[in-house]
Each structure stands twice: as structure tokens, then as C-alpha cells.
Image: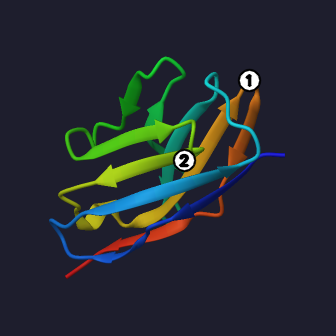
Amino acid sequence: QVQLVESGGGLVQPGGSLRLSCAVSGSIFSIDVMGWYRQTPGKARELVARIMPGGSVNYADSVKGRFTISRDNAKKMVYLQMNSLKPEDTATYYCNLQRGGTFVWGQGTQVTVSS
């Protein structure tokens, strides 16, 4: 059974940076789609970034040029480098694995951008 554990969230000032990590327990395959989503209270969970099996990536328009997603299948890790953070980036960030029709979520890590 695959489990995901996020880390790296915290409080950061506007303009600052954070790096989120997602550790995958169990098997991770090159065919898996890995992604980061975020959610704020009262709003639907939204896609932040996604990395496809072939390495191509998708980003939400709001984070393009500021966030970078990467994966290391050998280490079973997925990362989200977040630069030039804005208050509107404040949210709970979730790691996600898609394998066929199966979706696996982590427990989330809080990111707060505030002065």
C-alpha cells in the first residue's frame, strides 16, 4: 500500500522560499503521475503542479515561473520548490500520486506566507 508523507511547510515572509518534500512509502513506478495540490478553508482543492511519467510538467498559471516540481524515483521523493512566495500561496499543500484510476493523498503540510 502506497503512503505519502509531506514535510517542509511553515511560516515564511512574502518573497521568501520553501521546499516541500513528499516521501513515498511502498512502490513508486515511472508510470505514476505525481503532483502537488493545495487547499484553503471553504475552497476546493486545486492543482499546483504535476509531473507526468515522461517528465513533462504542468503548473497552475498562478505559480508558473515561481514553483518547480521534481521527482526522484530512486529515492521515492517528490519535491516542490516554491520561490517568490505570496500571501495568496497560503494553504495546506498535499502530495498526490495517480496510478491508473487510483488517487493517493498525503496528510498535507501547512504553508503560511505572511509578514
Q: Residue at x 60, y 54 (%)?
A: 23
| Mark seen at residue 77 | 2
What count of labels does the image hold? 2
Question: Residue 47: where, in percent of width, then height?
Answer: 47, 42
The picture places residue 42, in percent across and down from the top left corner, at: 54, 64
Report crowding for label 2: few under 14, some 14 to 19, many 20 or more residues within 10 A (C-alpha): some
Depicted 28 relative to depicted 41: above or below? above
Q: Is residue 27 left or right of residue 33?
A: right
Residue placed at 48% from the left, 57% from the top?
21
Residue 84 falls in image quadrant: bottom left
Q: Quadrant of residue 104?
A: top right
| Towards the viewer: 111 or 62 | 111
Percent of width and height locating residue 13 = 21, 76
As drawn, the label of residue 100 is 1
- The residue positioned 67% from the left and 29% from the top of the image is 29
Outermost residue on the front side: it is 74
Three-letter amino acid code at disc 2?
Answer: Met
Front tag of 2 and 1: 2
Q: Secondary structure at mark 2?
A: strand
Q: Residue at x 43, y 69 (%)?
A: 9
Q: Which mark is residue 63?
A: none
The kind of residue on which mark 1 rests is Gly
Q: Quadrant of the C terminus?
A: bottom left
Horizontally, residue 37 falls left or right of residue 48, namely right
Side (left or right) of 58 relative to 95? left
As helix, strand or loop, the secondary structure at mark 1 comes to loop
In the rendered image, the residue lying farthest to the top is: 54
